[in-house]
Amino acid sequence: MVGAVLTQNTAWKNVEQAIANLREAGVLDPRALFSVSSQVLEELIRPAGFYRVKAARLRSLVEYILDRYGGEVELMAREPGWLLRKELLSIHGIGEETADSILLYALDKPFFVVDTYTRRILTRQGVIKGREPYSEIQRLFMESLPADVELYKEYHALLVELGKRYCKTRSPLCLECPLYLEVGCG
């Protein structure tokens, strides 16, 4: 869950450093994370960028987990996905992508994550125009694929890898892309 908040507007390698800092400080569980001072938390997550904003968002998320589920993520995971999504989206600073990342990766709920890579790839392939709302893009996947957590994780991971390696923002490597022979490049 921490990674889903920290990855907002930053590279994953920076998130990994911030998570390593939190782990080393022994504050990765909800109670410990809530008990650490704002200044210490900000310093620990500084590598992830926007550390003041992200510290506040983490605090809001942790407060919700403590208040609603007594800090027990396992208890939280027993709730239906639709309810958790509604609750997560009500937390300041938690948007659709972050909520769905938490649902899929931390709570094993079948919600497909739509990120920048997904949008870019689908736009370049002509599947979408690029301005469609998150929910419309997510629906494309969730109506076309079985509601399978592991499938969603793998599919999303493959899109991220394809985006990082070939479908780059600038200078895409279309001719090297494994999709090129199937669908070309937009």
Image (cartoon, rainbow, N blue to C red):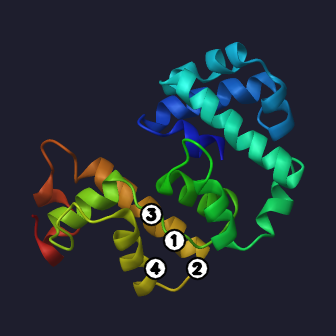
Mark 2 nearby-residue class (10 Å; few <14, some 14–19, many ≥20):
some
**Badge 4 density bin: few <14, some 14–19, many ≥20, Cα 10 Å:** some
Amino acid carrying label 3: it is His
- The CA span between labels 4 and 1 is 9 Å
Q: Earlier in the sequence, mark 4 or mark 3?
A: 4
Considering depth in this image, is 105 or 140 the residue closer to the camera? 140
138 or 148, which is in the foreground? Answer: 138
Residue drawn 53% across and 65% down?
153
Residue at image location 74% in from the left, 30% down from the top: 23
**Mark 2 vs mark 4, CA separation in Å:** 9 Å
Which amino acid, by three-letter code, is at mark 4? Met
At which x and y percent is residue 183? 15, 75
**Label 1: which secondary element:** helix
Q: Which of marks 4 and 2 precedes in the sequence?
A: 4
In 3D space, how far apart are the residues under numbered discs 2 and 1 (Cα atoms)? 6 Å
Q: CA distance from mark 2 to mark 3?
A: 12 Å
Coordinates of residue 26 in the picture (x, y in percent): 82, 27
- The residue at which mark 2 appears reads as 148
Relative image position of residue 50 (x, y in whole percent): 48, 24
Which residue is labeled 4 in the image?
142
The circle drawn on residue 156 is 3
How many angstroms separate mark 3 from mark 1 (CA)? 6 Å
Q: Residues within 10 Å of mark 1 (few under 14, many from 20)?
A: many
Say what secondary structure mark 3 lies in.
Answer: helix
**Disc number at residue 152?**
1
